[in-house]
Image: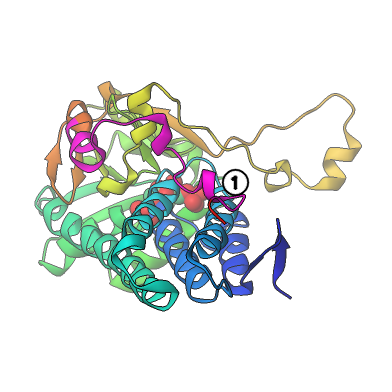
Amino acid sequence: MARRMAMVLIPQETQKIAEDIRSMRTRGAGRIARAAAKGLVIATSESKAKRVPSLLRDVAVAAQLLYETRPSAVSLPNALRYYYTRLLTQVNRTKGIRELKEVGLKIGQGFIEMSNNAVKTIGQIGSRLIQNGDIIFTYCNSATAFGVLETAYKMGKEFTVYVPETRPRYQGHITATWLDKAGISCSLITDNSIRFLIARSDKVFVGADAITANGAVVNKIGTSLVALAADEARLDFFVAAESYKFSPATMAGELVEIEERDVTEVVSKEKLASWKNVSVRNPAFDVTPPEYIDAIITEQGVIPPQGAIAILFREFGWYSTEQALPWESYLKGKGE
Ligand code: RUB
């Protein structure tokens, strides 16, 4: 059954996309963004609205549902904003609902294509930073960082990779499986051995969920510890991130919200219930300050973290808080 929300039917498939993001069946900032764009395309094409304002409200309600799934990956609101603002600009350029729906499909496809191409380009650019014989360190599971390694491998470069398990969700196991399938030799290691083994490595490649205006990187909890250890061992620390992971809201001084996930990811409900004085914290992301980052590899080129503001200006211009959620005023059916 489609779910009714403020008298709006959100298609079942869009609801499933939202639930998959919330439960982490769909995870990783890039995949979350592409899934969200697809969710809005479906919400547009399956809307039963007879008039454009009602269609905009239906899509707004779907956008809000998707927006509330996970707070830290800025790629998610950026993808929703990309779609919704473009849909709005097409309202006066199209003749009615059917044409607007067709345009919606093109906007969504445009985002997904742009995102996939960005990952590919970052792979090509980043692979130049890998030399034969390198021992590379990565963390968590980033398709973008993996793309760098895979491209370098396909170019014939020989290197090995250390992959920490990444408690509590063990995304490192996914990365190890991807590397294995690609034919790249790697060692899966416990998170506790990061400092010990990073001292025997050459460089670090990680992904990002968000990049702030001052060039700080929000990524899986523990990334900042990897950066500290890399700094101590004098390794280069590279971040591979598409430009839609840069956070425009941080230009207005907002902080990126750090997601706290369910504590049962860390200990069982039974164990928790057996304790009287123990509580558990499970923050999912942390912030690596720009001082610990040597370069951010984007599809627009390799930039120092201090260059983040240039990408933000280029992508979003001057940011105003009204841009935050362009669908907000349509949630209750503006203009109906
Ligand atoms: C995933 C994570 C990844 C970034 C970048 O966290 O921190 O490093 O999202 O991934 P989670 P990508 O598993 O909690 O989503 O490069 O694939 O976009």
Q: Is residue 67 left or right of residue 114?
A: right
Tell me where residue 206 sits by quadrant.
top left
- The image shows residue 198 at horizontal and vertical percentages of 32, 37
- x, y percentage for residue 164? 44, 47
**What range is drawn magenta here?**
310-334
- Respond yes or no on whether mark 1 lies under 8 Å from ligand 1: no
Residue at 27%, 68% in the rendered image? 113
Q: Report whether 210 appears left or right of 215.
A: right
Q: Nearer the viewer, residue 126 or 241?
A: 241
Q: Which residue is mark 1?
A: 168
> Please, what is the three-letter code of the amino acid marked with disc 1?
Pro
Q: Can residue 214 be seen at all in this image of the molecule?
A: yes
Residue drawn at point x = 53 percent, y = 33 percent: 258
Residue 163 on image: x %, y %: 39, 51
Question: In x, y percent, where is residue 297?
Answer: 19, 44
Q: Quadrant of the C terminus?
A: bottom right
Residue 328 colored in magenta in the image: yes
